[in-house]
Image (tube, rainbow, N blue to C red):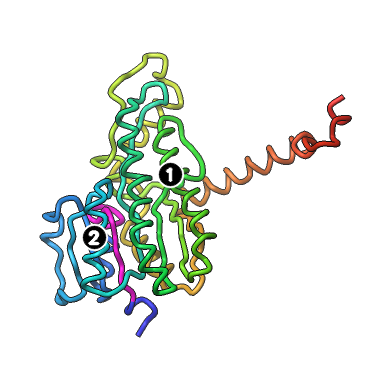
Amino acid sequence: MSRNEEKVWLVTGGSTGFGRKLIEELIAKKIPVVATARNLSAFDDLETNADDLLLKVQLDVTNQEQVNNAVQSTLNKFGKIDVLVNNAGYGYSGSIEESDETAVRKMFEANFWGASAMIRAVLPAMRKNRSGLIINVTSIGGLLALPTYGYYNATKHALEGLGKALSLEVEPFGIKVTNVEPGPFRTDWAGRSQFSAKHSINDYENTPARISEKTSHARSGEQTGSPELAAKAFIKIAASDNPPLHFIAGQNAFKREQEEISNIQHDMQKWQEDSTHLDYGDETYWQ
């Protein structure tokens, strides 16, 4: 028996993209999985010869009652939750100035508070078992930023921070946390699963904000990242005795994060003297 065969997975946002491909891969490997989506008809075509290994549950992560039901239904059927995958969420594009606050608050509810609700709901069972893995699907945009995706980046930066703090809090209980940071993958993220600001300001035409938005929409469906292969990586991470806190997913994301780290190091080195002379006793430095 492999390290994954005995694990029970709970996957949010399972109708498309990473969630769907991961569920399919788990079914193929005969690994117990709870497939969740806001509309269960999304799973009508799922094929499995072992219904005892698959549970379908309706779940809107912004609905606390449904969150609680998904967790309890998992425990009722399988008795435990070994891996939670926080995948539910969507994108939003528009410059900071153009964005609609009501729309971006709604995105925060799904991308951040929904994931937070799922984490809080599974932790009692994981603490009881003194084991578990929480995988947060954030984004490379949770480590860096792109113009026109500022509010989306903010949701993912928030989830990154939550995941990192969580990893320190639950380590004594044998629970691990992995933040997966994908770049462009061939999912619905830049298509059906993305919303755009309805208000447009002419000054932003031909600026990096608008160019970034148009480029993202244009490459939807042509991204080089494979969700099928990402699903295999998720399963390998869960089988590891020491899963990483950060998993950069895809060549594009890996290269961009290397550039981000280089830029941070450059600023730190250039401003090191000023940064390190801000304690009491450093007054003469500023004279």
**Residue lying at 47% horizontally and 44% vertically, measured from the top left:** 142
Q: Earlier in the sequence, mark 2 or mark 1?
A: 2
Residue 194 location (% of width, % of height): 29, 38
Q: Which residue is mark 2?
A: 70
Residue 117 location (% of width, % of height): 34, 52
Tag shown at residue 156? 1
SS state under label 2: helix
Q: Which residues are magenta?
A: 7-19
In this image, 89 relative to 77: left or right?
right
- Is 285 magenta? The answer is no
Three-letter code, disc 2: Ala
Three-letter code, disc 1: Lys
Task: Name the one closer to the observer, 223 or 257.
Answer: 257
Query: Circle 1: is it few (<14), some (14-19), or many (20+) Cα within 10 Å?
Result: many
SS state under label 1: helix
- Is 9 magenta? The answer is yes
Q: Seen from this angle, which residue lies furthest bottom?
A: 1
